[in-house]
């Protein structure tokens, strides 16, 4: 459904979450995807070996690392690593230069956990982070605000989970279509 709506990439969550999937489920889904869709495994503090095995077994293109993974872990996976940062204040900016990653995913800091919490943050911090590499904007994005986010930040990409769900772990097709439409329209302005 997301691919038909125009998504460029799909994220498969291997971390504890209502969105969690198994490597077997992901491998089966990926078998049916058309070409040119980027397939991303989402991990939180998984051992490097487990990430590498999931990438190989499932046929994933990238690993999105949302925990406290080290710069060495990202380096080992480079150029297939996206490093996620939970943004509370400017403090995360000091950490970015230590990481070699294809992109930095920025999401709002939440005590609820990593990713998919719907917590936003000051997009001005994302503008500052762009000095260190490609930025994927996440956290608190919805069909109603993604256009403004794209116009203001001009990120490399946007990422959404809870902002297009009917309930935790269940995407709402209309919200997915509206989100992608709004992001694409804003990127063309």
Image (cartoon, rainbow, N blue to C red):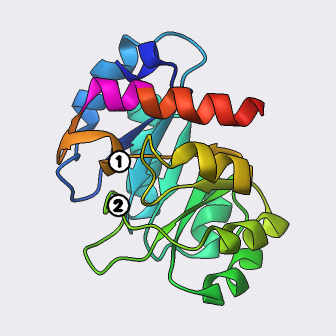
Q: Residue 69, how many percent across, how many down?
A: 50, 72
Residue shown at 21% from the left, 56% from the top: 17
Secondary structure that dominates the magenta span: helix
Horizontally, residue 89 falls left or right of residue 140, namely right
Farthest right residue in view: 131
Task: Give the mark nearest the N terminus, 1 or 2.
Answer: 2
Looking at the rendered structure, the secondary structure element under dot 1 is helix
Looking at the rendered structure, the secondary structure element under dot 2 is loop
Which residue position is annotated with label 2? 118
How far, Cα to Cα, is label 1 from label 2? 6 Å
Q: Quadrant of the N terminus?
A: top left
Is residue 66 or residue 61 the one in the foreground? Answer: 66
Q: Residue 23, how many percent across, how many down?
A: 28, 37
Circle 1/circle 2 CB separation < 8 Å:
yes
Residue shown at 44% from the left, 40% from the top: 143
Q: Is residue 179 above or below residue 96?
A: above
Q: Which residues are magenta?
A: 172-177
Q: Residue 150, how many percent across, how many down?
A: 66, 47
Horizontally, residue 168 falls left or right of residue 138, namely left
Q: Is residue 76 above or below residue 45?
A: above
Q: Is residue 45 above or below residue 164?
A: below
- In the rendered structure, does residue 124 fall within the stretch colored magenta? no
Is residue 79 or residue 137 the one in the foreground? Answer: 137
Is the residue marked by circle 1 packed among few (<14), some (14-19), or many (20+) residues within 10 Å? many
Residue shown at 33% from the left, 57% from the top: 116
> Can you tell which mark lies on residue 163?
1
């Amino acid at each position: 459904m997301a691919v038909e709506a125009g998504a460029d990439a799909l994220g498969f969550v291997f971390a504890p979450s209502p969105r969690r999937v198994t490597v077997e489920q992901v491998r089966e889904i990926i078998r049916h995807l058309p070409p040119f869709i980027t397939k991303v495994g989402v991990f939180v503090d998984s051992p490097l070996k487990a990430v590498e095995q999931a990438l190989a077994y499932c046929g994933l293109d990238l690993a999105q690392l949302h925990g406290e993974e080290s710069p060495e872990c990202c380096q080992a996976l480079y150029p297939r690593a996206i490093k996620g940062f939970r943004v509370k204040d400017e403090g995360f900016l000091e950490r970015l230069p230590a990481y070699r990653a294809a992109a930095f995913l920025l999401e709002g800091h939440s005590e609820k956990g990593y990713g998919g919490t719907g917590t936003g943050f000051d997009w001005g911090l994302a503008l500052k982070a762009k000095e260190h590499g490609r930025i994927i904007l996440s956290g608190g994005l919805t069909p109603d605000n993604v256009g403004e986010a794209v116009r203001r930040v001009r990120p490399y990409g946007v990422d959404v989970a809870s902002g297009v769900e009917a309930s935790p772990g269940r995407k709402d097709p209309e919200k997915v279509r509206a989100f992608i439409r709004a992001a694409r329209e804003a990127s063309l302005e």
